[in-house]
Amino acid sequence: MPFSFQNLTSGVTLACIAAVVLCNLLILLMIRAGVLDHPVARSSHTRPTPKGGGIGIVGAFILCLSPALYEAHASMRIVPAITGLLVGMILLGTVSWLDDVRPFPARYKLAAQFVAAIAAAIGTGATLPELIPFVLAAVFITNALNFIDGINGLASGVMAISALVLASTGLMPVAFVLLAVCLLSFLPYNFPKARIFMGDVGSQPIGLAIAWGGMTGFGTGSDVLVIALLSGVLWDVTFTLVRRARAGDRLAQAHRGHLYQLAVRSGLPVPLVTCLYWGFALWGAAAFATGQIITMVLMIVLPQLAWTGYVCTRARTRVQDRW
């Protein structure tokens, strides 16, 4: 049965309200803590800005999820899946925050992503043949959403839309409504102007949660839905990786060559680019709703080709340094 907000019990609603309050308190605490993201050559911001807003999102979600599921009288059958997700999110959140404070080699972060993805996948009851593609997809999606978190509101908005759409399908609705509530609580602090950044501590655990949405509904099309929702993000990241590989660039090296970054560097306003990627997520949901694979692919790919051509054309004439 499709989920609607009318299905929320008073107890779940109270859990969501508690999550909003807790999320705001933790975000304000992180702003006061003053762990700053100092701008460098590849940064989109120009002044030191607090980071760690993801602690508010992820912390509120983790602490309020169990009470929300209890109030929703959730089946005990989902306990392993929820446990696997929370283990993975806590692991990624801890490693990511340590890296946000004091960066360490990428291989350690990648190892943590694989362990977290395995924990999330095992919790869903995935068989061995399912486990490998699930883990690889989860790691790629986690990194993609981390890479895309480079301008105000883009990653958090796309993830909030994705969580709401996943909830509307009836797939773990309480978990994804709660996640959306936490993301939407953070969004005013980051868009259109940023008082705080989400940081890896937010983008990576939440990226895992969105990927987990595809795992939990394997066989029902939720894996395809997640790809459709994140189509703009996945296209941007894939195109950028291929372009940089062909140019002989080190793929692990930080850069400003993503399509969304080139769009901003070519003069397009940040809010416009952010809203466009939100639109890609909504368009992906509409494409999935057609139920026709060829129609869905065309609806997703054609706008991305047009966007890619437009951005690259602008970048050739307006971006002076190497991209």
Image: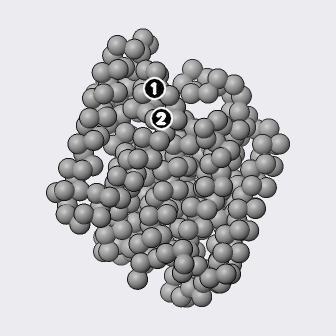
48 in relation to 179, above or below: above
Q: Amino acid at mark 1?
A: Leu
Asked which secondary structure carries label 2, the reply is helix
Q: Amino acid at mark 2?
A: Leu
- The residue lying furthest to the front in this view is 6
Picture quarter containing residue 262? top left
Residue contact at pointers 1 and 2, CB within 8 angstroms: yes
Q: Position of residue 173 (x, y in %)?
A: 51, 74
Residue under label 2, please give it.
Answer: 272
Q: Residue at x 35, y 20 (%)?
A: 314
Taking 303 as reference, is 8 left or right? right
Find residue 268 and name its label.
1
Q: Residue at x 65, y 84 (%)?
A: 71
Q: Is residue 216 visible?
A: no
Taking 257 as reference, is 41 left or right? right
Asked which secondary structure carries label 1, the reply is loop
Q: Position of residue 156 (x, y in %)?
A: 55, 49
Q: Residue at x 32, y 58 (%)?
A: 286
